[in-house]
Structures are given as C-alpha cells and as structure tokens.
Image (cartoon, rainbow, N blue to C red):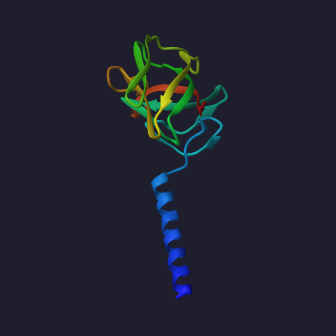
Amino acid sequence: MRLRLLAAAGLLLLGLGLGCREAAGPPALDMVDLFTFRQTGKVALTGIEGLEHDEAGSWRWLLGPGSVVRFRADRARPYTLRFGLMNPLPGQVVTVSANGRKLAAYGPLPAVKWLTPSVAAALTFEAVAGENELRFDFGDWNGRAVVHMPTDTRPLAAVFLEFLLYAR
C-alpha cells in the first residue's frame, strides 16, 4: 500500500511539474542582439531577413508592409529597444509600436547612401507578462509605389543596421 501511495504521489508531482512547464511557455527574453546572435530567451521574427554582409558592413532587410519581433516576458517590466535603420526609399515613413501602442514614427525619410543610418533610436516601453509584439510598419516597400531594386522581388522596406532589445 505504501509503495502505491509513493508511486501515485510521484506521478502527481511529475504531472504537476509537466503542467507548470507547459503553462510557462518558452523562456522569457532578457536580451537579444540580431547582429551578434547573443540572446537569452527566444524571439520569433516575421518580415525580417537573415543577416547579410559585404565589405561595407552588415545588415538585415525589413519587409513591407510590416516586420515583427515577438518575445515572452516573465513579468510586466520595462524593455529598451536600440536600433539603427537605413532607408532606401524616398519619403518612407516608419512607425514603431509595442503591443499595439505607438512608440515612435519617423519620416518622411529621404533615401540615403547604402548603409548610412537614417534613424538611430533608443525606445523604452513596458512589456506585459507573457507574449509581446514589436512592430515596424512601413508606408512603402519595393514594388508598391517605387521599384528601387528591380532584380529583387522581395517587398524590401528598410534595413536594420543594429538591433538590441533588453529587459531593464
């Protein structure tokens, strides 16, 4: 009888432990740098291309109409987003939001020389406990109003020159 009770208690504890892990979801994000690939926790990227580079530097293309970074926070707390952005399209407007709340808008921006920063910013916002979403929305992209790269059919809207997101 005692052995059955111990086995049942062990199964119950195992079940509770598994339930806790499932409810918790992926690890909370403390920091991510999209250029050095250093990160604690997980992020999901939508509309953000892989790292590219040449002799002039490194970059990541952002795709229109919007690019998204999703991450999980273990509790409500401030996060800081530091980013550098290059704009290849004349008159581009970029809006940055966190969880549906507008943080900043830039533009209309002039088109600049390749890998020359158009925007360098540090924005602090309050993340919610659980899932969070950072959005970069664009007024134009390759093929919409202007074709700025005729040999590339991707909806290229802007370029990240740096991206660092961290909990405060």
Camera-nearest residue between 75 and 29 = 75
Q: Where is 16 relative to 162, above or below?
A: below
Camera-nearest residue between 132 and 141 = 132
User: Which residue is pictured at 40% across the width and 16% down the height?
Assistant: 93
User: Which residue is pictured at 39% across the width and 34% down the height?
Assistant: 153
Report which quarter residue 156 is drawn in.
top left
User: Which residue is pictured at 52% across the width and 85% down the height?
Assistant: 4
> Horizontally, is 69 left or right of 138 in the view?
right
Query: For the C terminus, which image quadrant?
Result: top right
> Residue 68: x, y in percent?
43, 35
> Residue 48: x, y in percent?
48, 36
Q: Residue at the far left: name it.
A: 145
User: Which residue is pictured at 49% across the width and 52% down the height?
Assistant: 24
> Residue 137: x, y in percent?
39, 26
Q: How many marks?
A: 0
Camera-nearest residue between 99 and 4 = 4
Q: Residue at the far bottom: name it.
A: 1
